[in-house]
Structure formats: C-alpha cells, structure tokens
Amino acid sequence: VPGRALAVGAHPDDVELYAGATLASWTASGCEVHILVCTDGSKGSWDVDEDPSRLVATRRDEQGAAIERLGATGEVAFLDRVDGELDADRATAHEVAAWIRRIRPDVLLGHDPWRRWRLHPDHRAAGFLVTDGVVAARDPHFLTDSGLAHHRPAELLLFDTEEPNHAEPVDEVAAAAKVAALLAHRSQHLSTMGIGADADGSQAGAFRAGILAELAEVGQRFDVPLAEGYRRIESL
C-alpha cells in the first residue's frame, strides 16, 4: 500500500468508476489519497434544458461527497477545462506535472491513453496528460520557474486498460465504498448508471450488482476474489 497516491481523471466520477475500490482499500490502510479532475463536467447530462453552469457546481459538490465516501482526506483539485474540449497540450501537461510535484505521490493513477477504439476524447487526452506530465514532473529541467522540486513516482497505474498486467485486490468493504462513491454522483444516475426514479431501488441494486460482477471478473483473471485491473508501469 503506498503512503500517498494521486489519481487523475478526465471528469468527476471517472476516478471512482475505474479505481474507486482500490483507493478505498488503500485509504483504509492509511494511504493519503488525492484526486485531480481535468474537466468541469459541464456536458455530463442528457437533459437538453440543463444549465451547464449549475451542472458544473453540482458535479464539483458530488465529487467532494464521493471522495468522502471512499474515506479519502487528501486534496480534490480541478483543472476546470471545458468538458469535451480537453487537450493534451504542453501547457496542460505541465499543470498536471506541477500537481504531481506538489502532491509527491508514491503511485500515480490515470486513464490508459492507448486503449483502442475509445470514443471520448477527454479520456484519451487525460491519459496523455498523465504520461506526459509524469515525465515533466520527474525531470529537473522542466518547470524550472515553478519553485517545485522534481518528483518521480515509484509507479504509474493506468486504469480502464485493455491489457492489464497488474491487479489491486479489494474486499467487499472497499467494493461497497466504490458503489457508494459512484452513487454520490446523482447527476449521473440516469446517463451513466441506468438509475431513473427507481422507487423500489431495483435499478440501484442492478447497478451495484454490475459493479461487483466487474470486480469479480477482474479478480478471476488474477486469482483473487475481487480486484481492479491496471497497466502497471514501474520504469518511470
């Protein structure tokens, strides 16, 4: 279990969706978990009448509540790029690098930018911002005017990957924390979780069952009961 971790997601809820059980498990073992969200989540609604500015505020609040449900007490930071318009440019990669230097994580987590046939551009961009950012964070001749000492994490874990070579085993408590954290994103219930009015709770129950099934499927591949899978890169 790392002493400190930084997870970088494209949108509010991405970190919980892909690494929530891992972070809950680590937090329970004393890890200091920090979150960096790249975009403002302003397009994360199917309601054509939704006010984007109100949605931004809602999703920021939901992200804070979700991280609390994981048990994390570290910083929750936002780059506030417009949802759907995230670019993996040098300036933004250097912003990510600056956060890596500030937080100084033992483990860095982010989207796998090399996943094939990925539709959402923000997920691709966020992944490259992490891989490019860690290079700028580790090498002393980048960000020379920042006043931040260079930092090399011990490893990088890329989530939502097609080719996992590492699994983080989790227990049922961590799995429940992941589900609870995702359910904190109420604005996303219909669009990403299939939960509507749900008077009898059956839709939320089906969502929970789906998350547990995914954790069990990864666990089976790695001979443990429940797990989240990653592409692990140690030579940083």
Image: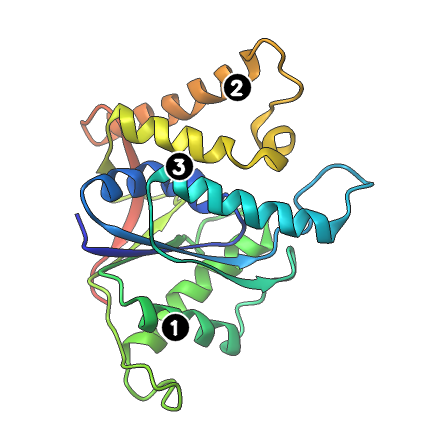
Specify the label residue 220 is tagged with: none
Tell me residue 150's x, y (percent): 27, 79
Cα distance between the residues tagged 2 and 3? 17 Å
Residue furthest out toward the right: 49
**Quick one: label 1 or label 3, which is nearer the N terminus?**
3
105, above or below 69, in the image: below
| Mark 1 vs mark 3: in front | 3
Tell me residue 191's x, y (percent): 64, 33
| Residue depicted at x 51% and y 34% | 184
Q: Is residue 21 left or right of residue 184?
A: left
**Quick one: label 2 or label 3, which is nearer the N terminus?**
3
Q: Mark 1 touching mark 3, by CB under 8 A?
A: no
Specify the label residue 97 is tagged with: 1
Q: Mark 1 touching mark 2, by CB under 8 A?
A: no
Report the front residue among 64 and 45.
64
Quadrant where the C terminus sits is bottom left
Q: Amino acid at mark 3?
A: Arg
Residue under label 3, please give it: 69
Q: For the residue labelled by badge 2, is the local secondary structure a helix, a strand or a loop?
A: helix
